[in-house]
């Protein structure tokens, strides 16, 4: 009796230790590469951000405490970049959510050729951001671009899209919206189709109007998924870099430099590595804050679905 | 108010909805159409005013992308074929390793509870959210020191790191869909956990692994920021080469458009193959699980 329970306990212990071995063994490749490629660089960035340091002169590193941060936070140019990035994020996310929810709502019904229409609509999202940037730069050329030609042929004035600060902001927003609205359509349609038909039937019995149904049933029921979509787009458009490299190159002047663009310019054009590190740390803090909101809601959703 | 009565308001709103959808479809499809059309235009036709819808197709853009014909040898050519090869090598090897690591980590996260699991999951996901330029400030130095700058190996390393987080989360989602009883029964019958994992659970998530690979490939294939800073000549990928494509008359639009079309073709194929799992991949394995 006692020997039996003894062997059972031994087997249990053996299973536990093999489980522990499995956890360790299976996680270590992922953990190793992430520690080497993420944790180590981030700690180094924080470290460098306290130094006056240039990648070009690696022998001279002068510790200067918080001076990089002081300089950055009192630099009006940095605030301009934050304001520009903020405007860009706001325009993009608003347009993408509105159009995405509208189109997604219309596409939730089953109709003939739905799969084909859907796949075709997803095409912009499949392109490389740098291709998207060049494509729009090509279409928005003030002299021979197709967009100005279309404006001209319906009697509207031509716009120097990439030559004026305000027009360039809208041009970038149009390109980003073009690329990412399909993503919102994809998520919104899925969220809308997940709402049980019986709820609508019950509402119809009570004589609810379509508007009432949309605002009181559809939107609230789809809200958790739409919220995830919103946060994802917030994060992605906030760190947008590739699109601006290809579309505007930050210009005209420095008018369309996002915060990401500023990090790259400080680090790889001016080689102010210490200052760039400090700016990267500021950018990271914002992104990590947004990611924490995202993860909390993802976990809640994971429990529900 | 019976639902069969159609008022003027209903009619107007129906046409309004239809009109808005039509405008959106044009905005959505138009540029893709224009990209494909332009990739077949000669330089003369590209800058023609009014823009041409009908023209004699010119294949020089595609010829230079694939490194064949007269265009590849001409002075204005930028030799994009090598960068296409780099793109294929880096994204295929990066995807393979990211999916392998992510599958292992995803399985453990789905089946075991361990200290710091929540933190680990957050850390893993946050790597997907990282702004590339932030870590690039340090990579730039690190890669130069370790001799990884401008090598395919270095880029593959970046590609693994950039995708392993996504792979872990998606694979966890797929493993969550496999009942825990599978392993329990195997263990009761005297098999090891490892046997249950490799022989029973893995075959059940084959489709999931393929879908995860599809996603990682698309991201690795289109990646630009890392590759643009960490390569100078030898290891340039196709998206980077596009951004550097410039001839005597400025950007060679035909080549850019042709390269854009070439870039989208594998993505289209993968998209089609993984269309059922699209939602899962886009929401880190949280939604669209069945």
Image (cartoon, rainbow, N blue to C red):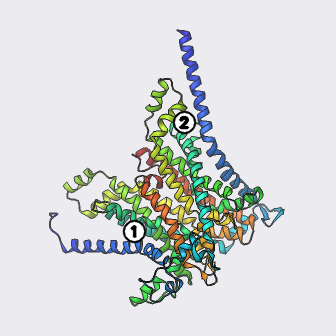
Q: Helix, strand, or loop for circle 1?
A: helix
| Badges 1 and 2, same chain | no
* Quadrant of image for the N terminus of chain B: bottom left
Q: Helix, strand, or loop for circle 2?
A: loop
Q: Residue B248, percent across and down? A: 64, 83
Q: Which of the chains bears the disc numbered 1?
A: A
Q: Residue at x 42, y 85 (%)?
A: A150
Q: Which residue is mark 2?
A: B113
Residue A192 badge: none
Q: Residue at x 50, y 44 (%)?
A: B172
Q: Is residue A133 visible?
A: no
Q: Residue B142, percent across and down? A: 74, 57
| Residue B3, above or below A247 | above
Q: Residue A89, percent across and down? A: 52, 68
Number of marks in the rendered image: 2
Q: Which of the chains bears the disc numbered 2?
A: B
Question: Tag 2: Cα neighbours inside 10 Å, few (<14), some, or many (≥20)?
Answer: few
Q: Left or right? Give the position of B110 relative to A284.
A: left
- Contact between labelled residues 2 and 1, with CB atoms less than 8 Å apart: no
A43 or A86, nearer to the observer: A43
Q: Left or right? Give the position of B206 relative to B102.
A: left
Q: Residue at x 69, y 72 (%)?
A: A75
Q: Which residue is mark 1?
A: A99
Question: Tag 1: Cα neighbours inside 10 Å, few (<14), some, or many (≥20)?
Answer: many
Alpha carbons under labels 1 and 2: distance apart: 41 Å
| Residue A84, above or below A295 | below
């Amino acid at each position: 009796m006692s020997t039996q329970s003894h062997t059972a306990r031994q087997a249990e212990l053996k299973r536990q230790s093999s489980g522990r071995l499995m956890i360790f063994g299976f996680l270590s490749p992922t953990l190793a590469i992430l520690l080497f490629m993420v944790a180590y660089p981030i700690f180094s960035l924080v470290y460098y951000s306290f130094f006056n340091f240039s990648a070009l002169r690696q022998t001279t590193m002068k510790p200067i405490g918080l001076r990089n941060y002081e300089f950055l936070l009192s630099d009006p140019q940095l605030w301009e970049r934050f304001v520009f990035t903020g405007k860009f994020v706001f325009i993009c996310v608003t347009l993408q959510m509105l159009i995405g929810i509208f189109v997604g709502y219309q596409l939730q019904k089953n109709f003939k050729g739905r799969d084909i229409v859907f796949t075709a609509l997803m095409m912009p999202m499949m392109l490389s951001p740098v291709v998207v940037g060049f494509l729009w730069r090509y279409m928005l050329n003030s002299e021979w671009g197709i967009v100005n030609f279309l404006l001209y042929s319906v009697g509207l004035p031509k716009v120097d899209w990439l030559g004026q600060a305000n027009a360039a902001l809208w041009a970038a927003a149009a390109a980003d919206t073009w690329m990412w609205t399909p993503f919102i359509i994809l998520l919104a349609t899925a969220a809308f189709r997940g709402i049980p038909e019986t709820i609508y039937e019950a509402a119809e019995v009570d004589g609810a109007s379509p508007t009432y149904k949309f605002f009181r049933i559809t939107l609230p029921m789809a809200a958790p998924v739409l919220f995830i979509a919103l946060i994802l787009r917030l994060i992605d458009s906030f760190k947008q870099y590739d699109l601006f490299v290809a579309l505007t190159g930050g210009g005209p002047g420095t008018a369309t430099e996002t915060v990401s663009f500023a990090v790259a310019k400080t680090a790889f054009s001016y080689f102010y590595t210490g200052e760039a590190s400090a700016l990267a740390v500021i950018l990271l803090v914002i992104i990590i804050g947004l990611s924490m909101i995202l993860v909390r809601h993802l976990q809640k959703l994971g429990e529900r679905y | 108010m019976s639902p069969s009565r159609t008022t003027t308001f209903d009619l107007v709103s129906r046409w309004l909805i239809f009109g808005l959808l039509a405008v959106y479809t044009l905005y959505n499809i138009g540029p893709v159409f224009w990209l494909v059309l332009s990739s077949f235009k000669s330089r003369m036709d590209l800058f023609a005013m009014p823009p041409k819808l009908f023209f004699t197709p010119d294949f020089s853009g595609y010829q230079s992308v694939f490194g064949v014909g007269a265009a590849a040898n001409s002075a204005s050519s930028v030799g994009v074929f090598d960068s296409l090869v780099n793109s294929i090598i880096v994204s295929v090897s990066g995807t393979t390793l990211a999916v392998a690591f992510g599958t292992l980590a995803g399985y453990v996260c789905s089946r075991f509870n361990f200290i710091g699991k929540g933190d680990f999951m957050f850390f893993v996901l946050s790597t997907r959210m990282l702004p590339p330029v932030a870590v690039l400030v340090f990579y730039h130095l690190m890669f130069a020191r370790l001799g990884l700058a401008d090598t395919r190996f270095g880029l593959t390393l970046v590609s693994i790191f950039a995708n392993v987080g996504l792979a872990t989360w998606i694979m966890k989602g797929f493993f969550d869909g496999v009942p825990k009883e599978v392993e329990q029964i195997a263990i009761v019958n005297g098999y090891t956990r490892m046997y249950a994992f490799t022989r029973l659970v893995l075959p059940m998530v084959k489709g999931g692994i393929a879908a995860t690979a599809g996603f990682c490939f698309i991201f690795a294939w289109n990646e630009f920021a890392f590759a643009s800073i960490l390569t100078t000549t030898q290891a340039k990928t196709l998206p980077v080469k596009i951004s550097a494509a410039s001839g005597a008359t400025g950007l060679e639009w035909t080549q850019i458009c042709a390269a854009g079309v070439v870039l989208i073709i594998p993505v289209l194929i993968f998209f089609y193959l993984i269309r059922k799992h699209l939602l899962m991949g886009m929401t880190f394995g949280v939604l669209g699980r069945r």
